[in-house]
Image: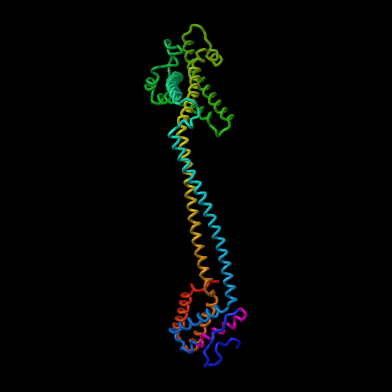
């Protein structure tokens, strides 16, 4: 046999060299024979297999250490792994550097925004570019809007009552008496709760339309043409509503006059209304004031926005600070991940360098010899009718031994 591990029964068995030029089948057979020989010498007892395992391991390690060419090749492979890990380490170091640089920039922006907020609070005029204070304009406009609101409430509640519920008499056919009724709400309460609700809520319709004029005139989400079209539609709707109220009131007055007239009078119609001064007086008493209310309200709100600009600006700056803080938190998380990767890679590099500093023994070197030597030992036990429990103990001892020396060789 080319690789007999012993030449005679009296010769002590020897282990084959682990060389690439040898046939694997010859190496396997040599280790198997060595295991049988040691089992025969020690009686095959599972309790004393450990010395054989250690002997195989030490002989393999010594043999691999003597193979300078193989050690050079293996250490070159390890150096390639180290270089690859170093490249990956440099990549993570650069990412960490970039993230820290961005983090410093974000934190600098936070401090800048905080300084801006402090400066604005100390001197608000720095963001109010218009000359003069908007407070006076706001107060004057607010007073006007309050009076106009009261006027519109009185006018439309009285006009609605006159148009829908009031019964006119000969003594109260004047235009002032027709529009303004000081007891409109009291009389409506006598007629029923629904009448009160109606005449009290109708003014809100016109106030709401006036408010919409303000909203549409400042709606930046739509095109100016569309905003003007919406405002025009509101004005037309309001004018038609006022026209209906005025027509109902003037018609009632006319019909009362017609009933008491000694001459024939034609029924009241729209063409007569268009030339009736009372008709147009009622319309413009509400419509013109409604338009003025909408314009003044828009002016008051613009002045309010000027007053509120300081708060709005500070809120915007604080929102930016909040966004910067979120980004800082993300960057800190990314930096922590990079540091974790750097620590892991440094550990791998250190482990590879420690392996290079000693004899490089591969797991395959040890696993082949140990497994086949144990197979030879078990073959001897089988031939001599050892129990399955004894064989299992041998395998467990082998596995425990391989686990105990696993850290001493490089894994392929």
| Residue 117 coordinates in the image, percent (x, y) | 45, 37
Residue at x-position 50% and y-position 66%: 350
- Quadrant assignment for the C terminus: bottom right
Residue at x-position 60% and y-position 76%: 69
Residue 21 is inside the magenta segment:
yes
- Quadrant assignment for the N terminus: bottom right
| Side of 23 where 284 appears, left or right | left
Task: Pick the residue in front: 58 or 356.
Answer: 356
Overall secondary structure of the magenta section:
helix
| Residue 133 coordinates in the image, percent (x, y) | 46, 26
Q: Is residue 387 above or below residue 93?
A: below
Task: Pick the residue in front: 296 or 1.
Answer: 1
Q: Is residue 165 above or below residue 305?
A: above
Residue furthest out toward the right: 21
Q: Is residue 87 above or below residue 273?
A: below
Residue 172 is drawn in which quadrant?
Answer: top left
Q: Is residue 30 above or below residue 179?
A: below
Residue 157 is inside the magenta segment:
no
How many numbered marks does the figure carry? 0
Coloring scheme used: rainbow
Magenta-tinted stretch: 20-37
| Residue 212 coordinates in the image, percent (x, y) | 50, 28
| Residue 23 coordinates in the image, percent (x, y) | 61, 81
């Amino acid at each position: 046999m080319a690789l007999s591990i012993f030449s005679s029964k009296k010769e002590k068995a020897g282990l084959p060299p682990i060389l690439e030029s040898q046939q694997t089948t010859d190496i396997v057979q040599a280790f198997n024979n060595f295991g049988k020989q040691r089992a025969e010498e020690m009686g095959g007892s599972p309790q004393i297999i450990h010395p054989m395992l250690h002997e195989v391991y030490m002989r393999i390690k010594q043999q691999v250490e003597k193979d300078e060419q193989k050690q050079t090749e293996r250490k070159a492979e390890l150096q390639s792994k180290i270089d690859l890990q170093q490249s990956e380490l440099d990549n993570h170091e650069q990412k960490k550097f970039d993230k820290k640089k961005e983090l410093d920039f974000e934190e600098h922006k936070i401090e800048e925004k905080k300084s801006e907020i402090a400066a604005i609070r100390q001197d608000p005029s720095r963001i109010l570019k218009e000359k003069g204070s908007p407070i006076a304009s706001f107060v004057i406009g607010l007073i006007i809007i309050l009076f106009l609101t009261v006027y519109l409430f009185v006018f439309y509640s009285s006009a609605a009552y006159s148009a829908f519920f009031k019964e006119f008499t000969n003594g109260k056919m004047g235009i002032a008496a027709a529009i303004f009724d000081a007891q409109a709400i009291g009389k409506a309460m006598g007629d029923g709760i629904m009448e009160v609700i109606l005449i009290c809520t109708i003014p809100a319709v016109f106030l709401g339309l006036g408010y919409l004029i303000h909203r549409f005139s400042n709606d930046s989400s739509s095109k100016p043409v569309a905003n003007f079209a919406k405002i025009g539609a509101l004005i037309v709707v309001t004018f038609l509503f006022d026209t209906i109220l005025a027509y109902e009131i003037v018609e009632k007055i006319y019909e009362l006059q017609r009933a008491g007239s000694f001459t024939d009078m034609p029924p009241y119609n729209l063409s007569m209304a268009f030339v009736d001064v009372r008709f147009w007086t009622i319309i413009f008493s509400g419509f013109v004031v409604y338009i003025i209310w909408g314009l003044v309200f828009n002016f008051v709100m613009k002045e309010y926005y000027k007053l509120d600009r300081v708060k709005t600006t500070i809120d915007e700056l604080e929102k930016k600070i909040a966004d910067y803080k979120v980004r800082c938190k993300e960057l800190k998380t990314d930096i922590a991940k990079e540091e974790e990767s750097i620590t892991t890679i440094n550990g791998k590099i250190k482990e590879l360098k420690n392996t290079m500093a000693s004899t490089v023994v591969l797991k395959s070197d040890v696993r082949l010899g140990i497994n086949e030597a144990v197979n030879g030992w078990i073959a001897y036990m089988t031939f001599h009718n050892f129990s399955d429990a004894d064989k299992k103990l041998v395998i467990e001892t082998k596995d425990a031994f391989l686990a105990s020396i696993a850290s001493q060789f490089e894994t392929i």
